[in-house]
Image: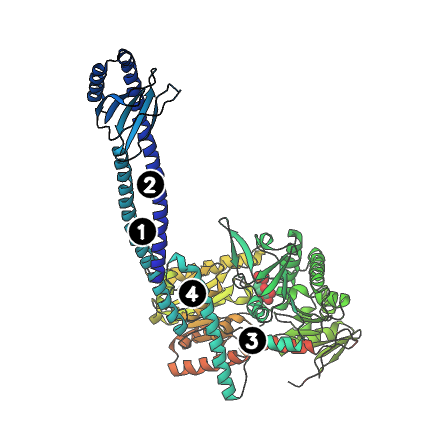
Amino acid sequence: MRITVRLAVSLVLAAAGVSSAWTYSQARRERRLLTQELDRRGTILTETLRELAVPLAARGDDAGLARMAGRLARREKPRAVAIFGKDGRAAASAGALDGLLAPPPTADPEPRCAASAGPPAARVCTAPLPDGGAVSVVYDAAPIDARVRELWTHGFWRLLVQSLLIVAITLWIVRWDLLAPLDQMAAWMRQLSAEGPASAPPTSTLLRPLASEAVRLAKRLGEARAAAEEEARLRHQGQSTWTAERLKEHARDRLQGRPIFVVANREPYLHVRRGGKIEVLQPASGLVTGVEPILRACGGTWVAHGAGDADREVVDALDRVRVPPEEPLYELKRVWLTKEEEDGYYFGFSNEGLWPLCHIAHARPSFRAEDWRQYQAANRKFAEALLSEIEGVPEPAVLIQDYHFALLPRMIKEARPDARVSLFWHIPWPNPEAFGICPWQRDILDGMLGADVLGFHIQNHCNNFLETVDRTLESRIDWERFSVRRAGHETLVRPYPISVAPSEATGKPPSKADLLKEAGATGSIVALGVDRIDYTKGIAERLLAVERFLEKNPAYLGRFVFVELGAPSRTTIPRYRELGEEVAREADRINARFGTRSWKPVVLQIGQHARREVERWYRAADVCLVTSLHDGMNLVAKEFVASAREEPGVLILSRFTGAARELRDALIVNPYDIERTAGALLEAVEMEPAERERRWSSMREVIREHNIYRWGARLIDDLARVRPGSASSAPQAEAR
Ligand code: G6P
């Protein structure tokens, strides 16, 4: 309340000051104008009086002077007129003289006016007569004082009304626009600190910036609380789980404070122009899902292709921008590629050559000499970008990602033998016969073996890689240590099953009904698919399984709905475009076959879905379907299990994913076997609650323990053991 009083008093004082100054100047002006007017009249009458008095005075006609004075006084209504002789006595007068004296003699013939000496207030105009006498006219000045008083009185009343209005408006604004929103805000923040951001923040524009800061703070507190609870729980159990905080400390300790540099083709944030504004997108990429939490936790630099159409607009002179945009934690360094480079290196060699080569998904790899040239050039370009970033940093830890950069480890190591270099291959590695198709297999293997640590998701991919090296290159393979020694340099080849960070979603999960309504769908049992639209993901096979399930189980018609969140990917490549069309056609066909006016079994949501949006579906769906034909790991499966659900869900998972090795309590399927996958769908929707719970909690435990921070810690551990710059730079063997 004190602020209301202070505000009102200040405003009233300010208004009083302004109003008084204004009334004062108005009163002065009014007094001046009225006085001038009175003097003008006095001057005229004085001149008239003098003209008439001169002949009469010359004749000494005092009676004539008295008559004339009386006439003028009656006609012009001054308070008094007087004619003085040269002896200073009044020769004639009319009206109340009130002690008026003869003016002192003056040589100036012009009439002069002045205020009278004493009350009553009057203006006296005088003019000299040629014989040494004078004439005077007295006008009453009391109306001028009255007018000025009236102005002050009006001023006072106006100020009073203004002050009342000011007080009322101040009270109103403070009450409704300040105190009420503050009360709401306080109530909301109380709820926030108790339950997390469960309800929407108050809508007051004044407090909106505060609300978003409060949400962030609450999230942080929530995370800290969860981490503390988890720590306490684990301490209690005598174990310790990996968290972002723990990884940060661990990395600092193991790398002795040296920074981390990630090189990946895909950037974690793209800046794009949408309707004149710059927006930030997070791409659909397992690599980004996995690696980003590591940099968030440890800080460092991510070197990537700047692929967003507004990317150049937000970087500094060194092509860097700090991300995440809402809470900058690390540097993103963008590398620019020409269209030819992107076509040859990314679409061509990486995604029409290596991608189908490494995935057994029956897509023929295409290897073109021009693409290979661009691939080499792009690897050099990224090497230069990275080398300029690590200049002056002793023994930097370099984490190269994926099949886009097979040549990069060698390039970096040659320029900076002291760098600790790892290459993590996010996709499968085929058997030696399959890899032998690649015309440049020797160069690729040699480039990869420049790394100190080479990671795959599973042991099988490591074995395939070692066998491929064995058959292709002159080298020594140590099958005990799982390492390759070539030209005096040793590369450790290890499985590091990638994973996800614990979900950060809080509050109540969204309801299925709400989500379906938003998607324009109906149903009561939701099965979910989340993919980049890629032929390795088995999306068409999944649709066939949904069709077979409905065919065999008509009881679910009208109740079951399959929602696919599909992100268009690599659409310049014809095979990807055709797949997009094929998926849409199949969905239409199945909908035409079973759908009714009010229900359709397949809902395709094609677009770049924000992480938050996908998480909402993970939390609400009953079943998640991952039917990849071949997949290094598949983080959709892990994200679903890690999502902040209240009820257990069921995961149907292809046996051809890396994730199937860890999530053994999923319903494991062969996606080529449509009949069995349809059977797994029935099993999923009819699973007994107890069984559901048992499978779910066992999978949750796996993901909780084998999370992305553990992945990062293991990789960093092995990298830290490298003896950089020495002939044998492999980490010391360690029993696992
Ligand atoms: C896979 C690859 C990643 C890639 C992602 C998305 O997960 O292993 O390297 O980033 O697909 O594909 P894109 O071509 O859009 O980066």
Asked whether the beta carbons under mark 2 and mark 1 sit within 8 Å of each other, the answer is: no
First in residue order: circle 1 vs circle 3:
1
Viewer can see residue 496: no
Q: Percent from the top left, x then y, of residue 134?
A: 31, 20
What is the distance, in whole Å, between disc 2 and disc 1 at their CAs?
19 Å
Amino acid type at image mark 3: Glu
Check residue 23 in the rendering and tell me which mark sits there, or answer none. 2
Neighbours of disc 4 within 10 Å: few (<14), some (14-19), many (20+): many
What is the distance, in whole Å, between disc 1 and disc 4 at their CAs?
59 Å
Q: Which residue is mark 1?
A: 166
Neighbours of disc 3 within 10 Å: few (<14), some (14-19), many (20+): some
First in residue order: circle 3 vs circle 4:
3
Ligand 1 is in which quadrant of the figure? bottom right
Amino acid type at image mark 4: Val
Q: Percent from the top left, x then y, of residue 351?
A: 62, 61
Image check: 78 left or right of 281?
left
Dot in front, 1 or 4 = 1
Q: Which residue is mark 3?
A: 245
In the foreground, 290 or 462: 290
Dot in front, 1 or 3 = 1
What is the distance, in whole Å, between disc 1 and disc 3 at their CAs?
54 Å
